[in-house]
């Protein structure tokens, strides 16, 4: 990208400065920050954006943290300061000493640092990657594959620091890929790995956007983890936080003595929910910073997707603000028009540069067209978290079965809008913290009922149109809330007797659901096609039973029947899309999952008796609080 290497400009050329001013420099990390320079006179080229600063110096291990000998020069009217330090070497710590427009001197971490000290230390670290990737086969297959909307996606959400209690990136690479592959998930999604000072933020309050957290190792160690996951057949999605950043005085806040990265008006800058600051999406340099950061993680770390956090907080000017606390847009509305432009540009940029990378919106409102292309008035995301589906279904499962008939619609309402966007069904980390209890604890009833409800729910989720995400620990029915300061309760899998069997049974069910899901295109190829799903009976509130069919493009059917009553239904009549023999692909009440073993001895036969607009009828036994998946085992009979 750079067109010049003048020593006083660092690595910046005239084209770089032009693109930065336009907000369109997509590789900004290559020219800003700290860059090792080889050759006759080796050293480090430093550059930083600080347009309102009166002076900038670089301080670090190489000059005893005294910047008197290493001032940076202002690069024209660009707002960039740059210089060269021959004494600096790889691994040295550094900061920028910024004399701000307000006359205050601040020691600032480098916004473009590619490595940082381990918290609570806050310095940036000079780093150049030397990693040799081995995932070429994965990347080639990813590039040649179908669009994510027509591909299987089953996501295991992970907080790196607490999966097994503080393993390093290298140690995680020895354990996590094998575990995820064994359970059959297609992807992992990591809570933010970018450096953050407060562990209790789980990574959602980022201070070094270009640096993987040093808590778990060096940047190339994180590359090794991604590489190992890819070579194990697992995609990697990163949570990414362009909505807000913390107010730490050594980081982005008031970087040059003015509101540089945050909006200058506190009615747009303040995010009171998190006591953080919102980016100024209308400023070209800020857009360039964020766009380059998204490209950086996709290209430099080979990640397969970004899940954009808190999209609603980006889109709405009145998000979590009372009347009088927010500033309307130029048209008098509540939409952040600068943010809309930014999100469209983000998705357009990644679609052009990284067309096989998926961008996912964590968006909980009724904003129309989140996954519609920008050309058709949308935001251009690949997938959207379906928070409404999650809240509705969890509310239903918390009800006593005696009352569930009055809430029957909660399980079906999601299909009313299931094809309005490309959805991912999330059971994520936010639902198992802050006194909300574990997923198992959300289920109604005694221990037996809770496990049965959970198993039935998981089978319903995997059957429902949309990709799915499950937060770590829920795959074996963790009993307690997630605690980021310790590991998961793996010991539950080793408990003796019935209790341990139930936890292992849920884990086995997740393994089997993923396996069958990936093997049966009926469950994912037509997620976005209304013709790929049909209710058989969505209204049987008296029996608390839901039944539906998923179809592949060639018409191959897969039937799901879900009994959310604790009563066994013998001789239950069910309309079927095909006559002949059907096998129980899944029965969540099976002994191997910790259930009671009620079922149909593995086989159901459908007679050619039309019912409910379908050509056949079967009589079967529905186990209590259980889900059944049925697949035809004979060729379709032409009548």
Image: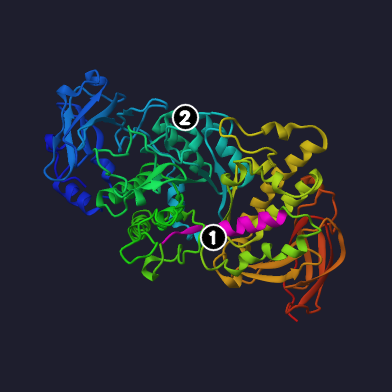
Mark 1, other Cα within 10 Å: few <14 / some 14–19 / many ≥20:
many
Label 1 element class: strand
Check residue 388 for magenta coloring.
yes
The image quarter containing residue 531 is bottom right
Point 58% across, 71% down: residue? 530
Is 143 left, or right, of 88 in this rendering?
right
Asked if marks 1 and 2 touch (Cβ < 8 Å), the reply is: no
Point 32% across, 24% down: residue? 91
In the rendered view, tell whether residue 320 sits above or below residue 497. Answer: below
Point 52% across, 34% down: residue? 173
Dot 2 corresponds to which residue?
A: 216
Label 2 element class: helix
User: Where residue 36 appears, x then y in whole percent?
Assistant: 24, 31
> How many numbered marks, from 0 up?
2
Check residue 100 for magenta coloring.
no
In the rendered view, tell whether residue 167 sits above or below residue 232. Answer: above
Mark found first going from the N terminus, 1 or 2: 2
Dot 1 corresponds to which residue?
A: 423
User: Where residue 132 appears, x then y in whole percent?
Assistant: 38, 35
Asked whether residue 134 is in view, the answer is: yes
Depth check: give the residue in front, 49 or 275. Answer: 275
Calculate the distance from the C-alpha at mark 1 to the C-alpha at mark 2: 32 Å
The image quarter containing residue 81 is top left
User: Where residue 169 appears, x then y in whole percent?
Assistant: 48, 32
Depth check: give the residue in front, 311 or 613. Answer: 311
Asked whether residue 519 is in view, the answer is: no
Magenta part of the chain: 380-397
In the rendered view, tell whether residue 148 sits above or below residue 63. Answer: below
What colour scheme has been applied to the protein in the rendered image?
Answer: rainbow
The image quarter containing residue 425 is bottom right
Q: Main secondary structure of the magenta part?
A: helix
Disc ID at residue 134:
none
């Amino acid at each position: 990208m750079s067109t010049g290497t003048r020593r006083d400009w660092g690595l910046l050329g005239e084209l770089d400065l032009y693109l930065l001013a336009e907000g369109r420099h997509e590789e900004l990390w290559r020219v800003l920050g700290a860059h090792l320079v080889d050759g006759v006179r080796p050293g480090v080229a430093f550059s930083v954006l600080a347009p309102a600063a009166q002076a900038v110096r670089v301080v670090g291990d190489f000059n005893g943290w005294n910047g008197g000998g290493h001032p940076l020069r202002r690069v024209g009217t660009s707002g960039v300061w740059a210089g060269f330090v021959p004494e600096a070497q790889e691994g040295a710590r550094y900061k920028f000493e910024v004399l701000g427009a307000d006359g205050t001197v601040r020691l600032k971490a480098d916004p473009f640092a590619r490595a940082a000290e381990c918290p609570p230390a806050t310095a940036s670290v000079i780093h150049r990657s030397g990693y040799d990737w081995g995932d070429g086969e994965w990347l080639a297959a990813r590039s040649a594959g179908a669009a994510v909307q027509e591909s299987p996606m089953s996501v295991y959400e992970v907080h790196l620091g607490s999966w097994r209690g503080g393993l390093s990136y290298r140690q995680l690479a020895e354990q996590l890929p094998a575990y995820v592959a064994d359970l059959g998930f297609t992807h992992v999604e990591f809570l933010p790995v970018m450096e953050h000072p407060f562990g209790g933020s789980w990574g959602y309050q980022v201070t070094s956007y270009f640096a993987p957290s040093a808590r778990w190792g060096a940047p190339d160690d994180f590359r090794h983890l991604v590489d190992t996951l890819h070579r194990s057949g697992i995609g990697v999605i990163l949570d990414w936080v362009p909505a807000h950043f913390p107010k730490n005085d050594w980081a982005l806040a008031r970087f040059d003595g003015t509101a540089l990265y945050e909006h200058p008006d506190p009615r747009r800058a303040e995010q009171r929910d998190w006591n953080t600051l919102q980016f100024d999406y209308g400023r070209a340099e800020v857009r360039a910073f964020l766009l380059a950061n998204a490209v950086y993680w996709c290209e430099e770390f080979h990640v397969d997707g970004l899940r954009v956090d808190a999209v609603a907080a980006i889109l709405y000017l009145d998000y979590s603000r009372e009347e009088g606390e927010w500033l309307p847009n130029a048209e008098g509305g509540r939409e952040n028009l600068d943010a809309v432009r930014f999100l469209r540009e983000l998705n357009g940029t990644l679609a052009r540069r990284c067309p096989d990378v998926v961008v996912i919106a964590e968006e909980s409102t009724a904003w129309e067209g989140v996954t519609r292309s920008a050309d058709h008035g949308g935001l251009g995301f690949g997938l959207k978290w379906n928070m409404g589906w999650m809240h509705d279904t969890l509310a239903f499962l918390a009800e006593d079965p005696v009352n569930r008939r009055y809430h029957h619609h909660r399980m079906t309402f999601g299909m009313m809008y299931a094809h309005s966007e490309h959805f991912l069904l999330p059971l994520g980390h936010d639902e198992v913290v802050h006194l909300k209890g574990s997923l198992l604890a959300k289920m109604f009833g005694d221990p037996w009922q809770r496990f049965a409800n959970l198993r039935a729910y998981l089978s319903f989720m995997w059957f429902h149109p949309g990709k799915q995400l499950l937060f770590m620990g829920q795959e074996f029915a963790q009993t307690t809330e997630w605690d980021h300061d310790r590991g998961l309760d793996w010991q539950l899998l080793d408990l003796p007797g019935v209790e341990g069997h139930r936890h292992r049974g849920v884990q086995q069910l997740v393994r089997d659901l993923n396996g069958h899901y990936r093997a049966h295109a009926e469950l994912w190829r037509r997620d976005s096609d209304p013709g790929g799903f049909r209710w058989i009976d969505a209204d049987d509130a008296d029996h608390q039973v839901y039944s539906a069919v998923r179809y592949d493009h060639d018409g191959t059917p897969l039937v799901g029947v879900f009994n959310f009553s604790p009563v066994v239904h013998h001789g239950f009549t069910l309309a079927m899309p095909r006559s002949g023999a059907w096998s129980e692909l899944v029965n969540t009440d099976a002994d191997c999952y910790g259930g009671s073993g009620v079922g149909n001895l593995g086989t159901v036969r459908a007679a050619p008796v039309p019912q409910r607009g379908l050509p056949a009828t079967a009589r079967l036994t529905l186990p209590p609080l259980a889900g059944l998946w049925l697949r035809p085992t004979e060729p379709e009979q032409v009548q």
